[in-house]
Amino acid sequence: MKKKDFAIAAFILLMGGTLFLWLYFRAALAQERDTPDVIKAAVKLELTSADVVPIHDNPNRLIIRAGSLGFKTYLEQQGWVEVDRLGALRVYRRGTQRLHAYCDMFSTRYAICKIYPNP
């Protein structure tokens, strides 16, 4: 009887965890073409103290904590200075180079920033 109780509890826990993940990321599941890579990056973001993590080793596509200054700090450490902000578009300058970064909310906790150098 104990094996049956354990199996039922494991099944309920598995289904509950799946439901939780689906509810937590439901708006984002159809938003990105590579949702599993984005979720892996979000998990990495949560397990580390980082505020910025590249998605699938792509330095031009980053996941950031929503509302943090980590993205701005990340670019400032590379010498970029924010010169303008137009809604979700941020414009940076380093010498004569320009960089456009478009940040879009992925979930209530995360945003995905796409960097376009020298547009």
Image (cartoon, helix red, strand yellow):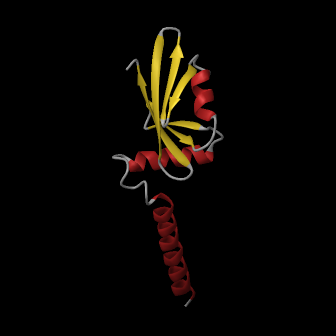
The percent position of residue 29, horizontal first and vertical second, equals 40, 55
Please identify the residue farthest to the top as the structure is shown. Answer: 96
Please identify the residue farthest to the front as the structure is shown. Answer: 86
Answer left or right for 114 relative to 33: right
Question: What residue lies at 54% left-to-right and 47% top-to-bottom?
Answer: 110
Question: What residue lies at 64% left-to-right and 35% top-to-bottom?
Answer: 69
Task: Work out whether residue 19 or residue 69 is closer to the camera in this orientation and state it.
Answer: 69
Task: Work out whether residue 78 or residue 92 is closer to the camera in this orientation and state it.
Answer: 92
- Residue 18 in sight in this render: yes
Q: Is residue 57 above or below residue 79?
A: below
Q: Is residue 119 above or below residue 10?
A: above
The N terminus - image quarter:
bottom right
The C terminus - image quarter:
top left
The percent position of residue 35, horizontal first and vertical second, equals 39, 49
Please identify the residue farthest to the bottom as the structure is shown. Answer: 1
Question: What residue lies at 57% left-to-right and 50% top-to-bottom?
Answer: 109
Task: Work out whether residue 117 or residue 89 is closer to the camera in this orientation and state it.
Answer: 89
The percent position of residue 83, horizontal first and vertical second, equals 55, 21
Q: Is residue 26 above or below residue 92?
A: below
- Residue 58 in sight in this render: no
Dividing the picture into quadrants, the one containing residue 27 is: bottom left
The percent position of residue 88, horizontal first and vertical second, equals 48, 37
Please identify the residue farthest to the right as the structure is shown. Answer: 49
Question: What residue lies at 58% left-to-right and 16% top-to-bottom?
Answer: 79
Q: Is residue 23 above or below residue 44?
A: below
**Number of dots carrying numbers:** 0
